[in-house]
Amino acid sequence: MTTSLIIDGVCPEEWTAAEHVRRYLSRADGYPRRVEGESVLLEHVPRDARRILDLGTGDGRLLALLRPDRPEMRGVGLDFSEPMLEAARVRLANDQRLELVEHDLTQPLPALGRFDAVVSSFAIHHLEHERKRSLYAEVFEMLEPGGVFANLEHVASPTHRLHVAFFAAIREPIEDEDPSDRLLDVESQLAWLRALGFDEVDCYWKWLEMALLIGVKQTEAREPPPRPPACV
Ligand SMILES: C[S@@+](CC[C@H](N)C(=O)[O-])C[C@H]1O[C@@H](n2cnc3c(N)ncnc32)[C@H](O)[C@@H]1O
């Protein structure tokens, strides 16, 4: 496994602090229903995917889940947090098929070539909304025709009451809410994906503030929509 260094942005403190990372990783397996969302994501990443990019890979959780059923897979995990990348090196055990790249997602994606799938889990919600949108556009450009974008994400609740209820459901004090969260509703993100040209866009799984958003890049140019009937 190789690690490249591409740092071109400022790092918010939370995720570069070893204690914050340790605390998240110690709880990561304990979030209710998370495995359910991950299993739906795994179902939608083709088994024959050869190149997979994981945005905000953390300790390489998604790459580790994708790896066993995809023997052809070469994976790239991006993250800006050195403690996370160190945890990923340990978890992924220097697998030569996987590369870790230190990169701040507030900045344009580095030139990494084309991918059959781009995945992410619980990372993109840390970016400002405008950057989320421009990142989705960059993902679209990086996908091969027919490629899949699957983003398992922490999304906004429609009301404050439901936001509080989500924290109660995951058994976290609302006071511990991550100050780097920039939550956005599902509908806005799906609309962006459609406007960018993604096909088959939908929320494929959801539980409270956890949602799996998927879009597929068309293989061929889209059929023009049918003409409306002529007026008589
Ligand atoms: C909640 S953790 C999720 C990690 C992993 N994807 C998982 O599912 O366990 C959020 C991850 O996003 C990363 N992250 C947050 N902001 C980032 C940024 N601007 N650039 C790169 N990575 C970022 C953090 O370092 C952290 O690894």
Image (tube, helix red, strand yellow):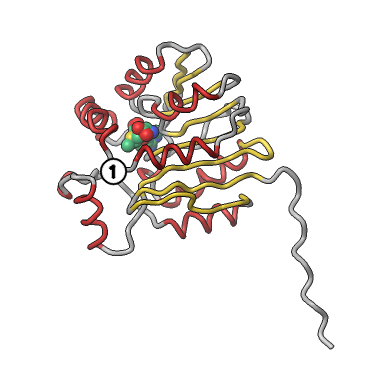
- Image quarter in which the C terminus is found: bottom right
Residue topped by disc 1? 180
Q: Is residue 66 visible?
A: yes
Q: Ligand 1 appears in which quadrant?
A: top left
Residue 4 in the image: state x and y as whole percent. 47, 18
- Number of numbered discs on residues: 1
Relative to 27, is 165 above or below?
Answer: below
Mark 1 vs ligand 1: CB under 8 Å?
Answer: yes
The residue under label 1 is which amino acid type?
Ser
Relative to 173, is 29 above or below?
Answer: above
Residue at (33% x, 27% y) in the render? 81
Q: Is residue 10 visible?
A: no
Residue 105 in the image: state x and y as whole percent. 43, 36
Residue at (61% x, 36% y) in the render? 142
Residue 32 in the image: state x and y as whole percent. 28, 42
Q: Is residue 181 left or right of residue 36?
A: left
Residue 44 in the image: state x and y as whole percent. 55, 39
Q: Is residue 225 left or right of residue 27?
A: right
Q: Local crowd at mark 1 within 10 Å, few (<14), some, or many (≥20)?
A: some
Residue at (36% x, 21% y) in the render? 85
Residue at (35% x, 14% y) in the render? 90
